[in-house]
Image (cartoon, grey):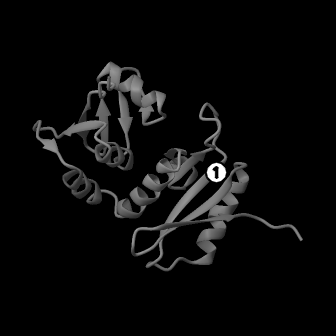
Amino acid sequence: MMAKPKKTIPAKLSDERIVIYDKDGISRLNEKRYGELHENFLSLSFVEGLYLVSKNWISLRDKNKKLLSFEELFDVAQNIDRKLCIRYLAYKDLRNRGYTVRTGLKYGSDFRLYERSNIDEIHSRYLVKVFSEEIPCEISEITGFVRVAHSVRKELIIAIVDADGSVVYYNMGYLKL
């Protein structure tokens, strides 16, 4: 006998985030380390929402109660976040590899990355900064990110997204000679 598929979690588009009010949905997503838990709702970033829509875990409606497709959500989100495409590709790749990925905004990075082996960790080990292969980056910008990561005792991973959507990762840090 086949297991009954889990129901799609209802979600609402709210300005610059996605909100879940369904208690079962909050529990399921929080258990898998998605979103930010608030008193009576769970908020998701656009990259998390895109990932969950692509997996058919959430069904997203706008303020007019119109069901949004992945493409429609992408269009809305891209108007707010110009780096959405490369952030989403890196997020999807890291999640598909089994990592827990959270926002890195307070560290000036795109993501915080948690070890696969211990999802109950309080502190992330890595900060991830995402760049496009097609847009040049100053070395001084990267050294600034390395300094921030070092000051908060994290390792910096640079994710480079190429024109085909493939992601390559580089671990950046200080080297004492």
Vertical placement of residue 66 versus 133, above or below = above
Instruction: Measuring from the top left, give residue 11's x and y in whole percent.
Output: 25, 33
Instruction: Measuring from the top left, give residue 116's x and y in whole percent.
Output: 61, 42
**Label 1 crowd (10 A; few <14 / some 14-19 / many >=20):** many
Q: Is residue 48 left or right of residue 144?
A: left
Q: Which residue lies at the image location 37% right of the left edge and 30% below the top edge?
A: 42
Q: Is residue 174 left or right of residue 131?
A: right
Q: Which residue lies at the image location 30% right of the left edge and 48% below the top edge?
A: 54
The quadrant in which the N terminus is found is: top left
The quadrant in which the C terminus is found is: bottom right
- Give the amino acid type for the residue marked by disc 1 in the picture: Tyr
Vertical placement of residue 86 versus 110, above or below = below
Q: Which residue lies at the image location 59% right of the left edge and 71% below the top edge?
A: 141
Residue lying farthest front? Answer: 1
Report which residue position mark 1 lands on.
126
Q: Is residue 100 left or right of residue 41?
A: right
Instruction: Measuring from the top left, give residue 41's x and y in whole percent.
Output: 35, 25
Residue 158 placement: quadrant: bottom right
Residue 24 placement: quadrant: top left
Tell me the element at label 1.
strand
